Image (cartoon, grey):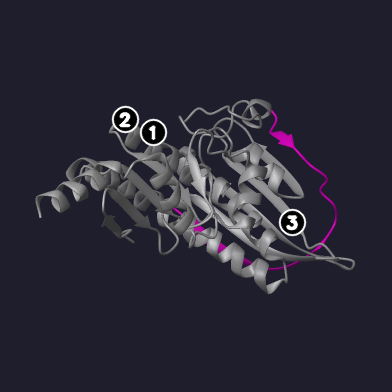
Amino acid sequence: MEVPILKQGHYLIASIQSALSDADLSQLREALIARVGKFRARGVIVDVTALDVMDSFAVRTLRDIAHMARLRGAETVIVGIQPEVAFAMVQLGLTLKGIATALDLEEGLAFLDRQGHGRIENRQGHGRIDRG
Amino acid sequence: MGASRIAKGMGASIVGDDIRCPIAADTDVVQARQTGRELATELGFSVGDQTVIAAAISEIARNILMYAKRGEVRFTKVVDGTRQGLIVVAEDDGPGIRDVPRAMQDGYSTSGGLGLGLPGARRLMDEFEVVTAPGQGTRITMRKWKRSNA
């Protein structure tokens, strides 16, 4: 089950649609890291709203995505962790320390905007307006 | 060389039919946790407990894959007096766990994982038992009881 990755401005949005196997998660990591370079992305949002369980492998992969993306110059936000999933994660001892999280996609986008990760796009936008 | 055992409050109970999930690939881990969640739903567990059960199954099923390559997860619905619950047994013929007390510690892993699988699963479930010996495989038995006020 491949995870669709959308490009929106300088952000990549990976929207997980269903339960993922370990191989699916690893594939998502590779695809996102490759696309950060390809699209010169400044921000990555991984939407896990549809995930009904998050185990140690899933958390490790999300952490790897965030760290690898940061090394490539993009900030990652994990959005949509459901309340019961959060409860089970805490019981398991799983944390996303040092990784940005937000309630949902809207909050995730707002977070990246606040961090200034879309700034370059804005500047280019002004440039185009000036030329016109 | 006796089998190592770690038990957390195993009580008597009445056992029903088994449902078996073979574990030999990462997609089987997904299948096992989905089966466990469906059974927990049938038993009337809360959504929170369904998620907790699914997460615990995911950890122990992945342990089978990582350490033994193949094995099985079995599910049994149980009734103990007025209590209803779910028993999850994960069994393999793999190398066994050499040092069970250490394997139950947070952050200890011989596979490069997070080392939260066994201790994490134990925290998620009400009862947890490991029977293993080097070269003789591993059997993990976990139970979750439905809370009467849930």
Name the chain letter of the residue that bears numbered label 2.
A
Name of the residue lying farthest toward the left: A131
Residue B144, numbered circle: 3
Q: Nearer the viewer, mark 2 or mark 3?
A: 2
Q: Amino acid at mark 2?
A: Leu
Looking at the rendered structure, the kind of residue marked 3 is Lys
Kindly identify which residue carries mark 2. Answer: A71
Q: Residue at x 74, y 56 (%)?
A: B144
Q: Quadrant of the N terminus of chain B?
A: top right
Give residue A30's quadrant in the image: top left
Question: What x and y, as percent, mark residue A115?
Answer: 41, 40
Separation (CA) of disc 2 from disc 3: 42 Å
Q: Is residue A31 above or below residue B79?
A: above
Is any part of residue A111 visible from this angle? Answer: yes
Q: Is residue A80 magenta?
A: no
Side (left or right) of B94 relative to A120 = right
Residue shown at 9% from the left, 50% from the top: A131
Is B25 located above or below residue B109 in the figure? below
Q: Name the residue carrying label 1.
A: A67
Instruction: Quadrant for residue A8, please give it.
Output: bottom left
Q: Disc 1 residue type?
A: His
Place of residue A17 in the rendered image (x, y in percent of width and height, measured from the top left): 40, 64
The answer to whether residue B25 of the structure is visible from this angle is: no
- Label pair 1/2, CB-CB below 8 angstroms: yes
Q: Is residue B58 left or right of residue A126?
A: right
Label 1 is found on which chain of the structure?
A
> Residue B139 or A103: which is nearer the viewer?
A103
Is residue B6 in the magenta section?
yes
Which residues fall within the magenta stretch? B1-25
> Going by the image, does B92 lie left or right of B10?
left
Q: Are marks 2 and 3 in contact (CB under 8 Å)?
A: no
